[in-house]
Amino acid sequence: MAQRLEMDPVSGRAPLVLGATSFDELTKAVAAPMERTDWRKWWVAFGVSVSLLGLLLVSVSWLVWEGIGIWGLNNPVGWGWAIVNFVFWVGIGHAGTLISAILFLFRQSWRTSINRSAEAMTIFAVMCALIFPGIHVGRIWMAYYLFPIPNQMSMWPNFRSPLLWDVFAVSTYFTVSLLFWFVGLIPDLATMRDRATTKARKIGYGIFSLGWRGSHRHWQHYEIAYLILAGLATPLVLSVHTIVSFDFAVSQLPGWHTTIFPPYFVAGAIFSGFGMVLTLLIPARVIFDLEHIITVKHLENMAKIILLTGSLVGYSYAMEFFIAWYSGNPNESFAFVNRMFGPYAWAYWIMVSCNVITPQLIWFRRVRQSPLILFILSIFVNIGMWFERFVITVTSLANDFLPSSWGYFRPTIWDLTTFLGSFGLFFTMFCLFVRFLPLVALAEVKSVQPEADPHYDPEAGGVARGDLEGATLAAPEVTHA
Amino acid sequence: MREAKPWGMLAEFENTQTFYKGCEKIRDAGFSRWDAYSPFPVHGLDKAMGLKRSNLPWIVLICGLIGASVGFAMQTWVATTAYPVIISGKPFFSWQAFVPITFELGVLFGAFGAVFGMFGINKLPTYYHPVFTSDRFARVTDDRFFIAVEAQDPSYDERKTKKLLESAGATHIEQLED
């Protein structure tokens, strides 16, 4: 195979994968993390994650036994960390589908290196999110009330409530994300099946790859299915956080009852999701030797999306203030001044520093190209977005219309353990993912290599596109057939 | 044990370019019972193989419309007939509030249609296929491309078909049994 040029000879842009990498070398690089024999470091990471997961189980068991009184909820603040954590995790779960669906529709081929792990992250984040509404109902054995199931009491849920819309939105989102992820995995599972050396792997990958044989009569329908799923997932991902924001916006509390909430929440969700993708992938690409596949350029592109959505979030904060003043509603104005200078000012300023100020560093090229700085920045994004949900939820509840009913929310140790425990679930799932499933969408990465183009001509250094209409040529010396 | 009978011919190609031209040749020679195998979807191969457009979008449309209708009908029935409760003085049939769930169920059923429709059209899972009997075929999920022509095809002729595939640039040809 010819040495890779500075430029991708087909697209005329910077190459997506660095180094002279053949299809076979790509397969080996992606399969290597699963085929290692030394799993000691993995066991350490898995051990820590499972311990945290154990903490979640203990916390939830104690919650079910004792009731939600073990949390720091009090009379004005009836919605505490459970809803904060729910929105936090669901928000993180937005980057995967954005990368796999929206960037797919926009033909952003750089997505192929990161979409698999981002989709996995989405699914695990939504699993973490789904725990909280499930357990915060108090009587967890009544959680089936959330669903329209015929019952002997002839009772039905209230379809006019945003909380019920949320049940449908998040469960649909989880199901569709899982299907989308699985469809993307099938060809790569077949690769693992064909490489398998042990019987267990042969059977395991064999069952889940459904007997995939790379037939083009299959690929044809497969590609249409993938395109349609992307088309369905795009409005879906935007609708999910819109509906999550309705949980707040449809109520009449000052600071919640605003029309800016849906776009503001969606921007924040994408912002936090990309933050978490960077947090996971910057170490993963080093640990698993994937630096030539998940390149600095990929990190840079994600950083730019963080900058864009971070600025949108900053704009939303400013616009909320402007409207609070412009509306002339004293309760609304008070809610926002209280956020800035009231009892939760500390949380508000953590939020602004992490979400609005630090992402602006991404304007500098040196910051964008430094994985270490981006990693630190991504941690700030995660912290800032958790505090955003805390500020929104708690400040409006703690200080509403009547000063006589004000209060102050203090979390208990069980709030903390439940939240930490949810990270345990997230990282346990991610550890299992990197051990058993390909971290990179192999078939898709191969398909965007210049050699994958049926008209690629290595001798001419470009593409002989005599028979394809409307194509711009990467190299001027190419002669038309 | 079942007796093995000849199934067809499997030709191996080393790169996308010769594979693509090979497909065009087989198409132009008038074959119908043949297939092309690759590690990733090769752009434009539908045309090179002379395949018709997929019917899957229609399946998805129908499933999506069923999902949305079921969603809307369920909410209307529950709110007006099965369990009418006055909430915030709103009418029982407040259709605006039914939009989110109608949309979500439309997307959900549409996605089921896309995935399971694709499985149905492709007859997946299919755990046995004659091409799997070839030892070289394992590389189809790595870096090799294959064209398989079935002996059942009326244009199939062991010698001529082999020659055609060789002239297209196949690097290895083998006979498969079923």
Image (cartoon, coloured by chain):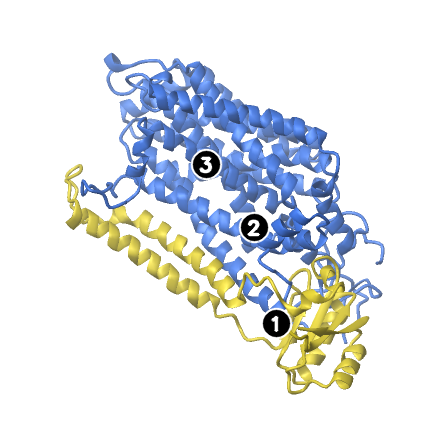
Chain colours: A blue, B yellow
Q: Position of residue B37 (x, y in %)?
A: 67, 67
Q: Are marks 3 and 2 in contact (CB under 8 Å)?
A: no
Residue under label 2, please give it: A103
Let me know if residue A103 appears in the view. Answer: yes
Task: State the SS at label 2.
Answer: helix
Q: Nearer the viewer, residue A95 or B126?
A: B126
The chain ID associated with circle 2 is A
Q: Is residue A373 above or below residue A171?
A: above
The residue positioned 72% from the left and 43% from the top of the image is A35
> Which label belongs to residue B46?
1
> Which label belongs to residue A90?
3
The residue positioned 35% from the left and 31% from the top of the image is A323
Left or right side of A5 for A447: left
Look at label 3 and name its amino acid. Val
Q: Is residue A43 above or below residue A308?
A: above
Look at label 1 and name its amino acid. Asp
Mark closer to the observer (1, 2): 1
For disc 1, the neighbor class at 10 Å (few under 14, some 14 to 19, many from 20) is some
The chain ID associated with circle 3 is A
Q: Disc 3 or 2, which lies upstream in sequence?
A: 3
